[in-house]
Image (cartoon, rainbow, N blue to C red):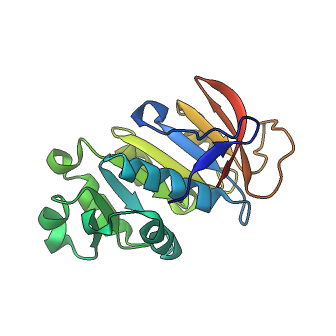
Amino acid sequence: MKRIINIKTKEEVKFTKENLPLFVHGKEHSGASLLSITIASLLHSSRVKLCIFTAYPMAKEEFMKQVENPVNVYYLEDKKNISEALRFQTIIVQSGNIDLFIKIILNTVGMKDRIIFIKNIETIHVQILELVKSYTFMVSGDLDFNLLQNEFKNMTYNTKIFTSPMEGVIIPPLEKYQAFMKDNIGDRIIAVN
């Protein structure tokens, strides 16, 4: 299983529900995808319930490679299987199927204790934003490229992670696949290991 380490101390960075809400901002090819999928797989390994929505199937494939127990993961492709999916620890909604994602999000009884993870946030519209606000969530993508960038940037986050500069935010120089993380512990540079 991949880990995330503090570059300076070489210690593992642990992610828990206390880190949420969380965002990972990054331009394409900056490592934001690998980092956010690794955070999701670490949460899964600590028995946290997740619902994952991605625009593209590569994220699902990377998540499945990283999790130690894929038996607890359900790939949801049809609304008629929502009840079955809710019995699993992690639900991955069919990539790009916004309508199916909305249907499962609206299932408030089965979803209230799950963390919602949206990858490729730049593909999301305002209806999704309004639905996700009522959940514990993490988002990942290029927040500068998002049509709702101001709404997402103005939300309150416990953890902010940058794999590339973001408009209006100064971050230290980073090597490829490193990220600048800000949370209640402080600022540090992290990387997937």
Residue 93 placement (x, y as % from top left):
34, 67
189 in relation to 54, above or below? above
Which residue is pictured at 30% across the width and 62% down the height? 91
Residue extending furthest toward the right: 173
Nearer the observer, 183 or 143: 183
Which residue is pictured at 79% across the width and 46% down the height? 165
When asked about the image quadrant of residue 86, the answer is bottom left
Which residue is pictured at 73% across the width and 57% down the height? 177
When asked about the image quadrant of residue 33, the answer is bottom right
18 in relation to 95, above or below? above
Q: Is residue 120 visible?
A: yes
Instruction: Give the total of numbered labels.
Output: 0
Q: Is residue 128 left or right of residue 111?
A: right
Residue 144 placement (x, y as % from top left):
70, 51
Q: Is residue 30 left or right of residue 25?
A: right
Q: Is residue 126 visible?
A: no
Nearer the observer, 95 or 49: 49
Q: Is residue 123 left or right of residue 25?
A: left
For the C terminus, which image quadrant?
A: bottom right
Residue 74 placement (x, y as % from top left):
27, 68
Which residue is pictured at 36% across the width and 73% down the height? 94
87 in relation to 134, above or below? below
When asked about the image quadrant of residue 161, the answer is top right
Residue 17 placement (x, y as % from top left):
40, 35
